[in-house]
Amino acid sequence: MTQTRRSLVIAALGGLLAASPAFAQEPAGKLVLYTSQPEKDAAQTTAAFKKAYPKVEVEIFRSGTTEVMGKLAAEISAGQPRADVLLIADAASMEILKKDGRLLAYAGAKVDGLQPGSFDADKTYFGSKLITTGIAVNTGAKTRPTSWNDLGNPDLKGQISMPSPLYSGAAAIMLSTMTARPDLGWKLFEQLKANEAVAVRGNGAVLRAVASGEKTYGVLVDFMAFNAKAQGSPVEFIFPKEGAPAVTEPVAILKTTKNEAASKAFVDFILSDEGQRLALAMGYIPAKPSVGSPSWLPAGTKINVMASDIAAVVKATEADKARFATMFGN
Amino acid sequence: MSLADAATTRTRVVETGLLWGLVLLVAVLSLLPIGRLVFEGLAPGGALSTSSLGKVLASQATWTATANSLVTAIAGTVLAVLLGGTVALLTTLTDIRARNAFTFCFVLPLMIAPQVTALAWLQLFGPSSTLLKLIGMAPPLGSKNPLYSREGIILLLGLQYAPLVFLTLRAGLRALPKELIEAGLAAGASPLTVLRTVVLPLMTPPLIAGIALCFVSSLGNFGIPAFLGIPGNFLVLPTLIYQRLAGLGPGVLSEVAILSLLIGLIAMVGILLQDYMLRRRDFRITTTSSAARPFELGRWRTPVEILLWTVAILILALPFLGLITTSLIPAFGVPLNAKTATLANYAYVLLEHAASKRAFVNSFLMSGAAAILIVVICVPLAYFIVWKKSRLLRLLNVAAELPYAMPGVVLAIAAILLFLKPLPLLGFSLYNTIWIIVFAYLARFLVLGLRPIISGYLQLDRTLEEAAQIAGAGLVRRLVTIIFPLVAPAAVAGALLIFLTAFNELTVSALLWSSGTETLGVVVFSFEQGGDSTYASALAAVTVLVTIGLMLSTLLFAKKLPQGVLPWRD
Amino acid sequence: MARLNIDRARKYFGSYTALDDVSIDVEDGEFIAVLGPSGCGKTTLLRQIAGFDKLDGGEITIGDRLLSSPERHVPPEHRKLGIVFQSYALWPHMSVAENVAYGLTVAGVRDPERARRVAAALDLVGLTGFAERRPGLLSGGQRQRVALARCLVTEPSLVLLDEPLANLDVHLRASMEEEFSRFHERTGTTMVYITHDQAEAMALADRIAVMDRGRLLQLASPSSLYREPANTTVAGFIGEGMVLPARLLSKPEAGHCKVDVLGVEAVMRCRPDQAASAQAKICLRARDFSIARDEGGLAARVERLSYQGGYFRMEVRPLASEETVLHLDAPEPAPAAPGETIRLSIRDGWVIPEADLAA
C-alpha cells in the first residue's frame, strides 16, 4: 500500500517536474537499458540520449526479445532486476509485466500527439514507433498480392514464408489480431496451411528467404523490407488492404528502477520530437505522426493500421498459439 | 624413518587435497547451475510448487519434443560416426595424399555457425540452387525444400558433428602401434578384417567418447532444428524451450528449467550407457613403437581421394563460400558480380565497428582461457576418474554432461540466478563481468575436454605412470612430466574442440554479455537480427580466416611438440 | 637392511581372495623367484610389495620399516624400490637418457653427477651410444636393458622384476638371464623375480616361492622344490611331476620307506616323520623310471613316442590303471613301438607329505 502510494506521489511529482523542466534537477547517474532494438539503432538511440542528458551514463544490454525477456525473468527470479528501462518489440510482453506489477506508472509522460492507442492507458508503457507487418515480395514474383487473403491463392503454393508466432512476440500479436477479425480469421491460416506456408524463427529469416528467392512471398515487418530494398535487395513491400497489424516497440520503466529520474528522462526523450525524429531517421514510422513519415513511404500514404486490443490479445494468445502449433505441426 | 613418514603424509595431503579440490570444482561447475535450476523448477521464487512440473509433464508437446530429440540425436550421431569415423580411418591408416591439408579442412566446419551451414544447405537443395540448376535437377519454384524435415535435421547434425568423431578417433588411431596391425596382417587377415577385428575394437574408447560427444551435442543443438525444424513445426526439446521462453508469463523459468533437466536426464542415460560399454574391457596399448605404416589403397587411392575431397567441399567449402559471397554484396539477395562486389562490409566490421574488434579479443581470450583451463582441470580429473576410480568423481563425470546438453540460454539463466547477487563472503558480484562468461564456458565445455582425455587414459598403459611412481615421483610431478605428455594428443584434440566451439558460441553469451564483454557470437547475432546479414557474414568470414591463420601458425613450432599432438600434422 | 618380510598378506578383490595369508621372508641380498601359473596371485603380490594396492590383512616390512598393513600404507613413491615391468613401461616421449635419468632428477640429483650416473648405468647394460634414441626405435632386448638401467640407476635396495623376459625371444632370454645373474652377484641387491617359467626361476633364484590360487604352496631352494615338493600341486607343476596314489608299506627309515604304487612295490624318499597312510600320494619324474628287462615291474602299453634329440619321450598307460598316463625318457634307439607292452621299474620317487592339501 505504502509502496504504491509513494510511487504515485513520486509519479505525480515527476509529472510536475517534467512539466516545468526549468526547475527540474538534471538527471544523472547510471541508467540500465534492456532492449531488443537492432544493434545499430540501439547504439544511435543511446548516443542521442546521452547528448541530450550528458550526465546520465547508459549501460545497455541488447539481444533478441526472447533473450532479453529471459534475462529479465532470471533477474526478477533472483530478486534483483538490474534494468531501469525496457525498450522491446511488443506490447504483449509489457502487458504481462504490467500485470505482475513490475512496471512503474509514469503519469506525467507527455503523450500529446502520439498515435492514439500506441500507449497504455495507465501510462506504464508507451509505443515509440509503429512497426507494421505486411507482405514482402521478391521482385521476380509473377503475381502481387494486395490483400492478406491473396496469400490463400493456390498459385502461391509453397512460396510463402512467415515468422512463427511460437518464437516471436510480434508475430504472436499479429496472429491473435488477425484471427480475431471476421474478414480474415482462422480461415486465412487454414489457407496458408493449404498453401504450405513455412513459419520460420524471426523476421530476419523471412527477409533472407525472400531476398534470396528461396521463397517468393514473406510476411515481414516494414522497415526491414524497405531498408533491404534501399541497399539493393530484390524486395518489394505491400501494405495489404485490410490493414497492417502493428507493434509499437514500447518503452517502460521498471518499478524497481534505481534511477527514476534518469528513467523518466529516457522515456521523455523517446517520446520527444527529437527522439521521434531519430526513429524516423532510422527508417521507422514514428509514434508521433507530426514529425513526418519515412522516405520510403510515398508521400500522403495513410497506413491502415489494423486495430489491436492488447488485453484481448494477451488473453487469447496461448490458445491461438496452441491452435497454430497443431495446425502447422507435422 | 620419521622423515619418510612425513613424506608419506605430505603425499597423502597432496593427493587428498587435489581430489577434493577437483570434486569441489566440478561440483561448482556442473552441479551448482543444475541445482539452481532444479530449485527454480520445483520451487519458483522460493515456494515449493509442483504446478510447473505437472504442467510440463502433462503437456503433449513435451513428449513429442522428447521423442523427436531422441530420434534426431541418435540418427544424427549415427551419421556423424559413419562419416567422421570413415574419414578418420582413411586419413590416418591409408596412404592418401595431402592428409594434413584434408584434416585441416575437415575440422574447420566446427568453426562455422550452424545457422550459416544450414542456410548454405537450404540454398543447395532449394529452387534457387546454382548447383542443382547446373545439373538440371533444381526443384520447381515453390516446391517444399526437403531439408525442412526430420531427415534434414539429422543430415545437418551429422555433418556438423562428424568432426567431433573425427578428432577424437584420430587422436586414438595415432596411438595405435604398427605391430598390432602388422600382427593381424601377418596372421593372414585382409586389411578390412584387421580393421574390424583389431583396429576398431582397440579404438572403442575414442569411438565411444566421440559418440557420446556427438549425442549430447546433437541433443542440445538449437541452431539446426531452429532453422530446419521450426518451419515444419518439428519440435525438439531445445526449440520447445525457446518457445516457452518467448511465451514469457509467470512460471516460465520453472517450466524451462524442468524441460532442461529432461534434456540433462537423457544425456545422462547416454553417458551411463557409455560407461557401461567401456567397463570390463581392456583397451590399453602397451607398446611404445612408432605409428603404423599406412595401408596402400593402390588403384583405389585416387577415387578415395576424390570422394574425401568432395565430402570436404560439401561440408566446408559450401557454407564457407556462402559466407564469403554474402559478405561481398551490399545487401542480401543482390547477385554477386564484378559490379556489385564490395569490401564495404569488411571495412565496416574491421575498421568502424568498435564492438567487433573488442569481440574478437574477448572471444579469443575467453575461448583460449576456457580451453587451457579445462585441459588443466581435466588431466588430473580424468586421472582420478579412470585410474583411481574415485566414485564421487565418477558421479560428477556424469554430471559434467548436463551443462553441455542443455541449451546455452538455460545455462546462462542458471548463471544469472547464481551470480546476480554478490558472492557470499567475497562480497563482489561476477555479474556483468567477463568472469561470468568464463564460468559459463568452463561449465559448458568441460565435457568437450573430459571425453577425449578420458579416452586417452583408457588407451594408456598405467605401468608408465607406475614406473614414474616407483622412481619416486609424486602425483603432481607425474601428472606434469609423464601423464600430460602421454595424453597430450587427446588433450590437444579436446582443447581444439573447446576453442573452436567457444569461439563461435552465441547462446550462452547472448544473455551474459555486457558493454565491453561482447563476444563474436553476440555481435554476429546482433547484425543478423537487425537484418544486416552482410555484416554478419563479413565478421564470420574474418573469424574463420583468423582461426585458419592461428591453426596454421601452430605448424611453426610443431616440431617442438610431441609427435601426434597436432591433428593436422603427421 | 633390505630384508623383505611379508607376513600373512591378504588381499581381496570383491569376494575373490587374491592373496591368502602369504608369508615370505626374503634375506638381504637374496634372489627370490615367485613362480606360478597366471592368476595365481604372483602379480598381486608384487603390486603389494610395490605399494600400488592396499593390503587387506597382514604386513609388509622392508628392513625395519613397515610399508603396508591395513592401517598403514606407504605410497610407492616413498618405498625406494626398483621395478622392471613386463611391458618395460619406457616413456615414449623421453629419450633413453631421459628415461634413465628420471629417478635421479626426482631425487634431486643434478648434473654432472646425474649425467655421470646415467652414463654409467647405460654402460652397465651395454647401451652406451643409445642415450639420445627414442624408446620406440629400440628392439625388445634394448628396451629391456633401458628398463633395467632405469631401475638400477637409483641403486634401490630391493628390485622387483615382473616377468621381465616374457616378451623376449629365446636367445635373448638366455643372455638376459645371464645378465640378471651377473647383476645380482655384482650389486648384491635383493631381488624378487615374478615369473611363470620354472626354468627361468630355477636358473636364477636362490629360493623359489610357488603360488597357486592366492596361496603360497612352497618356499624352498630350486633343488628341494624339485626333489621334495611339499604338496601335489607343486609336485605336478614343477618338473612335469607325475602324482600317483600309493599305499605306504613301511615306516620311514633313513629317509626312505616302502610303498605300493599301481600294485608294484618300490622304495622312495620321504620325510623322516612321514606317517603311514593307505591313501598317500607320491611324485615321480620321467627319470625315475627305467625299462625292466625281466618280467617284474609295472606293465604298461606304449601310447606315443616323440623324438627329443638323443632320446625319446615315451607316453605309456599302465595296464593296471588305464586312465593314468606316465611319461619317461628312453635313450636311442627306441625300446618299443606304440601299442607294445613294456615293463617299468621305479628307481626313485618322493612321498608327498601333504597329499590331501590341494587335491
Image (cartoon, coloured by chain):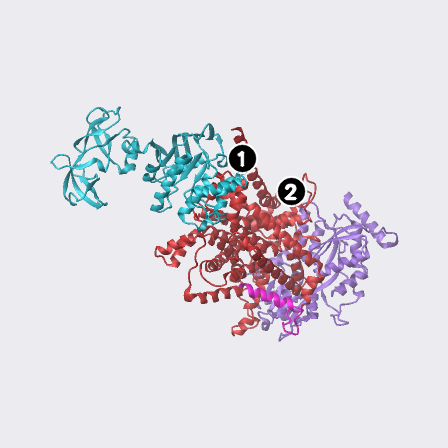
Chain colours: A purple, B red, C cyan
Which contiguous range is marked in magenta?
B315-342
Q: Which amino acid type corresponds to the residue marked 2 in the rendered image? A: Gly
The residue that label 1 is drawn on is B12
Label 1 and label 2 in one chain: yes
Provide residue B411's location: percent of width, then percent of height.
61, 49
Q: In 3D space, how far apart are the residues under numbered discs 1 and 2 (Cα atoms)?
A: 42 Å
Badge 1: residue crowd in 10 Å (few <14, some 14–19, many ≥20): some
What is the x, y in percent for residue A49?
A: 79, 57
| Magenta region includes residue B301 | no
Chain letter belonging to callout 1: B
- Nearest the viewer among A145 and B120 is B120
Look at label 1 and name its amino acid. Arg
Mark 1 near mark 2, Cβ–Cβ under 8 Å? no
Viewed as shown, does residue C13 lie left or right of C303? right
Q: Residues within 10 Å of mark 2 (few under 14, many from 20)?
A: few
Q: Along the line of sight, which residue is nearer the eye, B489 or C348?
A: C348
Say which mark, if any, is on residue A131: none
Residue drawn at the location 60% of the way across and 50% of the way down = B370
Q: Nearer the viewer, residue B303 or C139?
A: C139
Q: Secondary structure at mark 1?
A: helix
The image shows residue B12 at horizontal and vertical percentages of 54, 35
* First reached walking from the N terminus: tag 1 or tag 2: 1
Residue at the spot of label 2 = B46
- B320 in magenta: yes
Q: Position of residue C266 (x, y in %)?
A: 18, 30
Q: Secondary structure at mark 2?
A: helix
Determine if residue B202 is in view.
yes
Give the foreground label among 1 and 2: 1
Chain letter of disc 2 in the image: B
Q: Quadrant of residue B332?
A: bottom right
Residue B394 visible in this rendered orientation of the protein: no
Q: Residue furthest bottom?
A: A142
